[in-house]
Amino acid sequence: MTPDKMNGAARQAGKPEGTAGADRPSNLRVVLEARERQVERAACWLRIGVASVASLSDAALAISAGTTRLALFALVVGTTYVALMAGFLRLLRRERYHPWLKYLTTTIDFAVVTGLTVAYLHEAGPETPLFETVAVAMIAFVPLINLLSALRVGRAIIMFGTLLTCVSVVVISVTLGRGAAALGYALGLALASGVLAWTISSSTAEVLLRLARRNQLTRFLPREVVEQVDRGELDLKLGGVDQTVTILMSDIRGFTTLSESRTPTEVVQQLNEYFTVMSRIVLDHGGSIDKYVGDAILAVFGLPAPRPDDAQRALDAAQEMLHALERLDRTWEARGMPALRIGIGLHTGNAVAGNVGSPERMDYTVIGDTVNVASRIEGLTKSYQVPVLVSETTRRAVGESPVFSLVDNASIRGRQGTIRLYSPEAMNGLCPTSVSDAHFFGETKSLTPA
């Protein structure tokens, strides 16, 4: 994958050139919707249980007070309420989440509780021994219902629930008829429940945001980097620093031609399997996934701070990637899927690492000549028919322990001068990019470097 192709992908995605990357939108909304769905489902079951017990208790209480009509009313309302909750449960089982459902269930909760309470108080009358006890108990109970909104993350539902709580306690207090003092006490409880629900909801949202962000970052960055972000030691804000990194660029050979003979579903399935294995290898060796561009992987070793063995880590990752691809090829061929061949380019040098983009959308990436050179080197693996090529700077950073073969003193397109390219001898027999591969992919390979 050349820089030209990378920048083309960036332009298509509406990103600045040189910063193309995988789409990384925050999945907080998905997390919150999944949590709200779970909360609503649990709340519906709770409502069904409470409503069943409450309607029977209200009916028994009404009968003891000599109001058979109120007992029948309580049973009808309770049965209807349970049927509605069962219907909501059916809606929650569907794949699509309906945000309006929480407002509807909240309205029904307060309407049923307030309606039953006021109906009982009117029917029983002040002379009934339990008249004041029931009224006071319900004034205290209604704000507790409002605390359910704390389990739903969002300001709007909390404000909506608090408003209904205030209306409910005012209606019950007026029915009780104990004056302004009782009304003030009831409104105080209602507003206090809203403040408490707001506090709980905000804390929950913050925790979920951290978990969602951590889950997102661990897909691309080493665990130690994510932990630094969590501890506040690494600030993910706009800007970057110039530091030494080793870039690993890998690309699948002939993937465009290969994709033309297969369905998009088959291509995506194989790519996902490939990316999953290769990304894990990079992360296990202390690298980070900067981006996926089509079928190419851009990995960086040396973030957030360079280490003396970054080049060796990158080289080890490259070798393990080739071994892993051989295993994947055997699995794919057994399933009737085509084998893949890859080329890997390694280059060490300075690059600017940091967040690029806007405050609304940032991409933690590396930019600089080092990235472009690594991409060009990877492209030359096809011309020289070797799986891995490393630059002179990477070879020096690794040291003399691995055996390298000098491949050529090659010109890099778009760059003045030449650069020495080496091939690790231990990897030359792995996933060879040979002439037979050209026949396999329907390509014609050139032995002359671009």
Image (tube, helix red, strand yellow):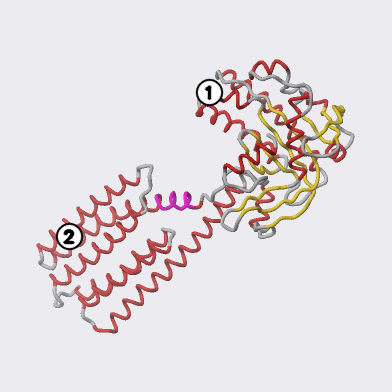
Quarter assignment of residue 143: bottom left
Q: CA distance from mark 1 to mark 2?
A: 63 Å
In the image shown, does 256 or 325 lie closer to the viewer? 256
Does the magenta-highlighted stretch encompass residue 309? no
At a point 10% along the width and 62% down the height, the residue shown is 68
- The amino acid type of the residue labelled 2 equals Ala
Q: Return the residue at label 2.
A: 74
Q: Horizontal and vertical percent for residue 111? A: 24, 63
Q: Would you place residue 159 above or below residue 229 in this image?
A: below
Classify residue 40 as left or right of residue 328: left
Residue 262 marker: 1
Q: Quadrant of the N terminus?
A: top right
Q: Helix, strand, or loop for circle 1?
A: loop
At a point 16% along the width and 67% down the height, the residue shown is 119
Quarter assignment of residue 63: bottom left
Q: Helix, strand, or loop for circle 2?
A: helix
In the image shown, does 230 or 315 lie closer to the viewer? 315
- Magenta-drawn segment: 29-37
User: Of label 1 and label 2, which has the lower sequence position?
Assistant: 2
